[in-house]
Amino acid sequence: MSEQMPSYTPPVRPPDPLSPESERIWAALAHLSAVFSLFSGGIFGSLISIIIWGVFKRRSKYVAFQALQAFVFQLVTFGFGVCFLLSPFLFLDNEGWFVITGLSAACAITWIFALCAYALIATVQCYNGADFRYFIIGNFIPK
């Protein structure tokens, strides 16, 4: 008669928490990815921030919150950027199409620089250990 041996499962220990310095660095990198995202078409930076969120969500609530916030910020800004780029095509039959296209391009360029500045402010704030929240977006993301 073969007796089955009880299977042994090693105890699962929770992941080690991040040090405060590592938390600040990873949170800052999540926000810095927004700058990269703005110049790479919106995809790669978003991937970086969501990967940071996925890797560190159990190890640090601070990093998880900052990375998720950076991800949502990048999605929202990407959507507005697409609107700026597509808005001139709504007025193709209009005689002022060149003016509208020029205004749209100027708005898009201003938008990119403003978002880069905002993401860099978030990066510096997180690197200094502050609990940064994006305007409006930070209030909708659970902490």
Image: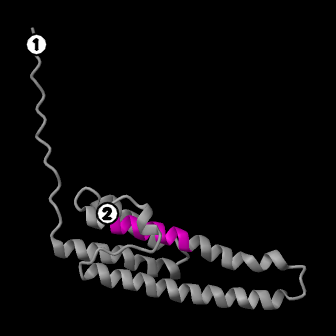
Total number of numbered labels? 2
Residue nearer the viewer, 134 or 98: 134
Pinpoint residue 40: horizontal percent, then vertical percent.
52, 78
Residue at 69% from the left image edge and 79% from the top image edge: 85
Secondary element type, mark 1? loop
Pinpoint residue 22: horizontal percent, then vertical percent.
20, 73
**Marks 1 and 2 in Cβ contact (< 8 Å):** no
- The residue type indicated by label 1 comes to Ser
* Marks 1/2: CA–CA distance: 49 Å
In terms of secondary structure, what is the magenta stretch mainly? Answer: helix
- Circle number at residue 132: none
Residue 1 quadrant: top left
Residue 18 quadrant: bottom left
Q: Residue furthest top?
A: 1
Q: Which residue is mark 1?
A: 2
Residue 67 magenta-highlighted: yes
* 51 relative position to 72: left or right: left
Q: Which residue is mark 2?
A: 64
Pinpoint residue 19: horizontal percent, then vertical percent.
15, 70
Residue 89 magenta-highlighted: no
Residue at 27% from the left image edge and 81% from the top image edge: 127
Secondary element type, mark 2? helix
- The residue type indicated by label 2 comes to Ala
Q: How is the image coloured?
A: one colour
**Extent of the magenta region:** 64-77
Residue at 42% from the left image edge and 81% from the top image edge: 119
Pinpoint residue 84: horizontal percent, then vertical percent.
67, 79
Residue at 44% from the left image edge and 77% from the top image edge: 34
Crowding at mark 2 (Cα within 10 Å: few <14, some 14-19, many 20+): many
